[in-house]
Image (cartoon, grey):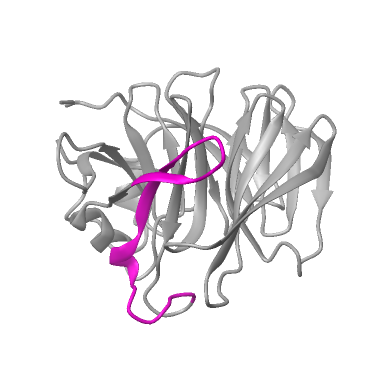
Amino acid sequence: MIRLLSVLPLFASAAVLADAAPVAMRMAAPEAHQGAASDGTFVYAIDNDRIGKYRLSDEKKVDQWQGERRLFPHMNSCTVVQTKLYCAASNYPAVPQTSAIEIFDTRPLRHSGTISLGFGPGSLTVIDRHDGKWWAVFANYEGKGGEPGRDYRYTVLARMDEQFRIEQTWAFPEEVLARMAPKSCSGMSWGADGLIYVTGHDRPELYALRLPEAGSRLELVETFAIATPGQAIDWDPKAKRRLWSIARDRSEMVASDIPEVASKR
């Protein structure tokens, strides 16, 4: 089942927002420029070179981190694993593309390590943990930040081992890539239902994908309208079907309650 896929304009309209997944919470955060990540007690607002830590119970900022822009030109999607925050980072929009995973302790919030990936199959925009593996998205772009001979169609999902070595990669569905063009995948988070949820750069849409039974291209299961335009996302581990995203034009973190997927394999 596909919802609101073929009729959505490039930017959110009033009709789209009226049908968007219900918003459970909005939280002002000046760092909410690239994405949000949550451990269920706190939510982290992510910018290129800074992070704000906010307590969910009272929406107060309790900690912050600021890095040097020359060292942190472009952080994107992050995920919380125990007491550490793992963030996808790259040299976007510089080329050739290089990527790294930046690691932060969350108690207190401080930078504690870097895993350099160097040159890869694209620009690292997502890192996630699922089923004992690391999962990453390497984005490619048409135009700014892209490399000659590779556009958005070369964006890949990668499964990585404990040493962050790529084991397998999958291409994105052509219909999803067309919605992301000329940009790419900015957010991805594995759902508790075993599906992969992704967002692009600027459309208010959430795509539920699954690994294919055969072949190398992910399959689109369902598309949801959401109240925020793309960027990095993260599921709240303590609230069922609650997804964190950002509205960068308003510097807000937004929690939406996503409906269950209507159709699975």
Horizontal side of 156 relative to 222 (left or right) equals right
Is residue 227 something that shows in the picture? no
Q: Quadrant of the N terminus?
A: top left
Q: Residue at x 57, y 59 (%)?
A: 249
Closer to the camera in the image, 13 or 211: 211
The part of the image, by quadrant, that contains residue 202 is: bottom left
Horizontal side of 177 relative to 254 (left or right) equals left
Closer to the camera in the image, 43 or 91: 91
Q: Residue at x 66, y 24 (%)?
A: 82
The magenta span reads 145-168
Closer to the camera in the image, 118 or 69: 118
**Residue 6: where, in percent of width, then height?**
16, 55
The part of the image, by quadrant, that contains residue 42 is: top right
**Residue 144: where, in percent of width, then height?**
47, 78
Is residue 185 something that shows in the picture? yes
Horizontal side of 191 relative to 97 (left or right) equals left
